Amino acid sequence: MPTLKMALATGVALACLSGAATAADVKFGFLGGVTGPIESLTPPIIDGANLALKNVNDNGGLMDGKTIELIVGDTTCADATKAADAADRVVNVDKVSAIVGALCSGATISAANNAGIPGGVAMISPASTSPALTTLDDKDLVFRTATSDAFQGGVLARVVKSAGHDNVAVTYVNNDYGKGFAEAFVAAFEAEGGTVADSQAHEDGKADYRAEIGSLSSSGADALVILAYGDGSGQTILRQALEGGDFPIFYGGDGMVSQAMADNVPAATGKIIMTRPGTPDLPGSDAFNVMASEAGVQADGTFVANGYDAAFILALAAEKAGSTDRAAIAGAIRDVANAPGEVILPGEWTKAKELIAAGTDINYEGAAGSQDFDENGDVPGVYVTTAIEDGKIMNTGMAK
């Protein structure tokens, strides 16, 4: 089994590897790409989830004082078999009560189909954005606190069009995330009056994409949209396209938002604009930002707030159910996340416990926005644009 490659930046709680011994009363799983094409994005998301569980454990715990521990399984993001294996371990060996994750869409689908759904375990992904999750036959067990790319595709299309680009090429990683995002972007961009000169899938993990880049460049497009991972193929494509002078400007989605890419491709400064989920100007996001800052958690990291929300909602659901039974937790998720009810903000665990004990309905308003799950487990959301400035990933504004 792979070892955990990161040390948590905050120390807010210790995440254990799947299969490791634990003294906690309750176990939640975390499935994410500890290794692979999003390995630099994963540690801050774990930190966000652990901060939520620290809030629970430090403020009365679950029900009669039970503590919750996060058990981490490495899906690698890119390998469906390894995602299934990681899910099998946390579900059937570690016996977790619920799961935060997975992160990559294909990993979430594989984990759910092979272990989560058969095991009756609720899964809340903080980062899976493929539209394929909406129609997954999941027995109402798979939710997400990140918005579907059916929505992000339209946001990115409007960002590109409003920048004055009418003719673009698209390259996307050949998996559920890339295909779903590309379909949504192309449809939205064409609906906005734009032209997609060429759209091609590519395989992740190659060392050389110059042939693919040359083919896309020959289409005559004036910008390249890269829908891939900034720690994987997206970084290589961006670097090689910049070296070849094939395109003057690039665009990408949330998977491309990577500090490792900014570090490794300094020529990308001022050359790529990306969209990613943002935190709205709401009381929940304000409360989270203060709390995360005090704990040393990267509050504005990609999907960090979503990771906090996923873990906190699962804890609230267990408290509402009065049980760590898997089915009971799954059945209480909408009861604690959706309106109507007394508003609960991030960190307000003591208040939530008191209201639940009194029989009062609650409505969690999250760090990443109002986490009101529809019948498919999807939520609305907001997006920001990001760019590389002075070697850092920086938010540059709201994406309309």
Image: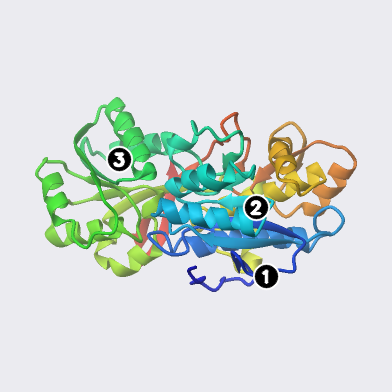
User: Farthest residue in the left direction?
Assistant: 218
Q: Give the percent coordinates (x, y) of residue 298.
A: 55, 63
Q: Say what secondary structure mark 1 lies in.
A: loop
Disc 3 versus disc 1: nearer the observer: 1
> What amino acid is found at the position of numbered circle 2 in the picture?
Ala
- Please tell me which of labels 2 and 1 falls first in the chain: 1
Q: From where the camera sits, is residue 115 visible?
A: yes
103 left or right of 122 in image:
left
Rendered position, 101 above or below 242:
above
Task: Where is residue 391? Give x, y as percent.
Answer: 35, 67
Q: Which residue is mark 1?
A: 21
Given this view, does label 2 or label 1 mark the residue nearer the observer? 1
Locate residue 381 relative to residue 388 in the image: left or right: right
Residue 268 vs 318, above or below: the answer is below
User: Callout 1 environment at 10 Å: few (<14), some (14 to 19), or many (20+)?
Assistant: few
- Quick one: label 2 or label 3, which is nearer the N terminus? 3
Report which quarter residue 210 is drawn in: bottom left
Q: The disc labelled 1 sits on which kind of residue?
A: Ala
In the picture of the structure, the residue carrying the numbered disc 2 is: 311
Residue shown at the point (59%, 42%) measured from the top left: 118
Residue underneath mark 3: 160
